[in-house]
Image (cartoon, rainbow, N blue to C red):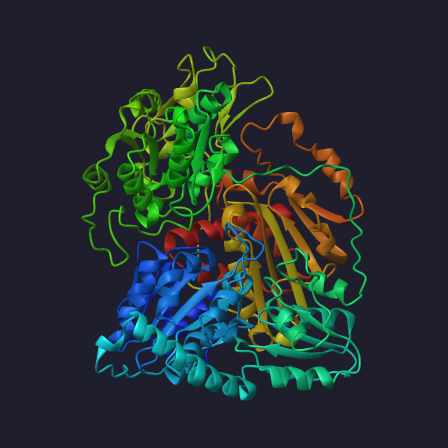
Amino acid sequence: MSLVKKMCTDKDNESVVAQGNIAFAAGCVRAGIHAADGYPGTPSTEVIDKGLSQVQDMITVGWSLNEATAVGSGVGHTLAGSDCVVTMKIPGLFQAADPVSSSACYTLERGSLVYYIASDYTPSSTQHLIDPRHFLKSCFIPIFEPRNHQELHEAAKIAADLGRRFSSPVAIIASGVLCHSEGLVQLMEKETRERANVPDISKFMTLPGAARANYDKVVTERVPAMMEYVEKSSLNTRKKGSGKIGIITHGVNELFIEEVQADFDVELDVLSLGITYPLPMERIREFYESIDGDVYIFEDGQRYLQDQLEAAGLKVIGKTVNDPCTEWTPVRIAERLGHAIETPFTSSVATVARPPMICPGCPYRLFGEMVGKMRQKGTLEACFGDIGCNTLLHFMKAMDTALAMGGSEAKRMGYVLSKPESSTKCLSILGDGTECHSGLDATRNSIFRNVPGVKVILDNRWTAMTGGQPSPNSPVNLAGDANVFSLEEVLKAEGAQVTTVSGYDRKGLQKTLKAALANSEDGRLNTILVQGTCIRKVPKDQFGGQMVVNADICKRCGMCQICPGIEADEDGLPFFNNQCSTCGGQSPACGQMCPVDAISMIRPDKKKTEKKAAIAPAPESIKLPSVDAGSFPERLALAIRGVGGQGNLFFGRVMTQLANLAGYGDTNIVKGETHGMAQLGGPVISTFACGKVSSPIYMPGTADCVVSMERSEVLRPGFPDMLRKGGTVILAKTEVHPAKMAKDSYPKADDIRSALADYTVVEVDVLKAALDLGDASGRSANVVMIGVLSTIAPFDTFPEELWLQALKNVSPKPAIWAANYAAFNAGRSLSK
């Protein structure tokens, strides 16, 4: 039984530690929500991808090809009387703005339509930072903003009940911090929802007369009823302090304020708004007048709350008109309240620049290399990009501009209409999932307008950037049904000239692109499908064997140095590291770059069998000792840094399981993490804390230990400052050099040691330990590091058996458990 299925079926009030998106997904099922739809978009994706996809026997669920169609599907569910959740991130809301706004004023009884909109105001994985509350307010759509994981778990029921009560769509704006972090949740009461009775769907029209009548009814009846409700709602809460300092806030910021209160031992009066439209203005005014001193406002996004309060005559301290702050943290809140934050760590050693990159072995790489060189030579004047993995070609100098889903070809068309002479010197580029999302509209538009040129669709068969969800071009849909859609045939039917070529065929790519650019003078749109399955979706048994370099003929020219999976030694001789994927068994890109054919692959049937290290068998079960939760530290905190792909997220999941086994479920357990583009080769940080803790983002100087899975990442600004006095830095010797980075640009090991001279540092070679165990990928290095951590104070207070059970809980499959058992023990030995 999957974790999600267990959460959906376990008894009421059972305590679990869950990621926010998964807690919400389980809450949908436990609340009796009938259906869910959406389009993949970090930070909301996991609700369907890792959540509701696991319980398709309990809820009708699927991915649509874009957010607008998902909303249309949701409206259809509600007209059938069902309650439906539609998931998206903020840009997706604006993509679906027409059906969202057009259906907002339906006034008759129907099933509830709940929009689950995940915010990303940093942003980590989103293309803009526009606050959606202004738009939702203009549509008269109530907004609920969960403040913690428990409210996120219960959010679908809260919103669906509001929707039924007011015959209105309801928006849940979930902070990306809550979506991706883990926290303690008590499973809500399971219930069954009766479908609504919708006797006559013919009244759900948006003809002008109906739209006018609906609008009038919403303004004169629905909105006043909602305003009366929010003034009394328990979803808006007040916490009393000394009455000297008042704070009005919303969402996850309440947890951040609790962290500040605990760290500085300060009394604050807090009015926390669960509902941010409509605002309970009478309640806000009553709170404001009860404070003798200043009243602060902490809100994410823009000045949505602040502007309304100031318009009502309330003088609050918030953001200036030109304040760029879009997302608060405990540190920012503490500083705004006048508290000094100590950051003692300084270093003259420069951190490594890590722009996010496409994965080792990605089928986009050869195309990116080729286009980057054409841009440098001036053969190509401009490359118009899109949203998704293809955006990362920008860091290969193969893409100039990115705008929105499906926007690349429309930009190219407009550019060529203004500069007809450039039709043979520019490209539009996007992924196959994005073409299916909205790019086909632009394809059709260029053909309709008779604008010649070249459009490149990088066809990896999946919605790869958000984790490999199915699109219409994938082999199967979410339910596992075979897809019959053919992107190639659709493009041909539109009237495009279509050529297909393998992403792993360098000469074929060069020939195809050259011919397409030359043919663009014929007045037609030439479309190239660059095909190659996403490297993360290629079955492991299809991967190649071992990459080798013939040192006798290698020229040490560096032409092969195009991928993080290949490096060069001090003499310039290439070698392959643990990141090499052998291009998924296809013709390796690096080999095709070599001018003397010095690189080759030894296939598995020719490869000599290597002796693996002898490892002790993993026990089938673990006898847990009786533990006294009171004997463990009152509060523990840990921060983990690394590079995307090093297993930070797994590390954190093990820690939350450990804390639960140790009894911290009676107080609190939280885990935070970075998601999005930072995962693809960029810096990643995860946090874990248990006991007397509120937020997944905590104050500097409060971590008992910081772990750096990559040597130079320990120097990332703000990271050492997280450590409390007397804490320990655990530093991996692993070095991950960005592709094409000069060797002498990476910080020297001795310089890093000198920078950390004032700290207690434990330096360990966890990658070597993983490789010595026979793990050629080195992925178990994170488990080796967990073994090291288990021997370091104060984490050594937990019995070894609890650590092992936590590992087994996260990955119980026998083969993975056996490998993790060996890696954990290797880490304990390494530390000793």
469 lies left or right of 660: left
For the question of whether residue 108 can be seen, the reply is yes
Can you say whether 115 is above or below 529 in the image? below
Q: Say which quarter of the image contains residue 502.
A: top left
| Residue 360 on image: x %, y % | 45, 35
Q: Nearer the viewer, residue 222 or 801?
A: 222
76 lies left or right of 112: left
Q: Residue at x 66, y 26 (%)?
A: 744
Q: Nearer the viewer, residue 659 or 372?
A: 372
Q: Residue at x 52, y 75 (%)?
A: 277
Q: Residue at x 38, y 51 (%)?
A: 815
705 lies left or right of 204: right
Q: Nearer the viewer, residue 737 or 386?
A: 386
- How many labels, in total? 0
500 lies left or right of 224: left
Q: Residue at x 53, y 30 (%)?
A: 739
For the question of whether residue 16 can be seen, the reply is no
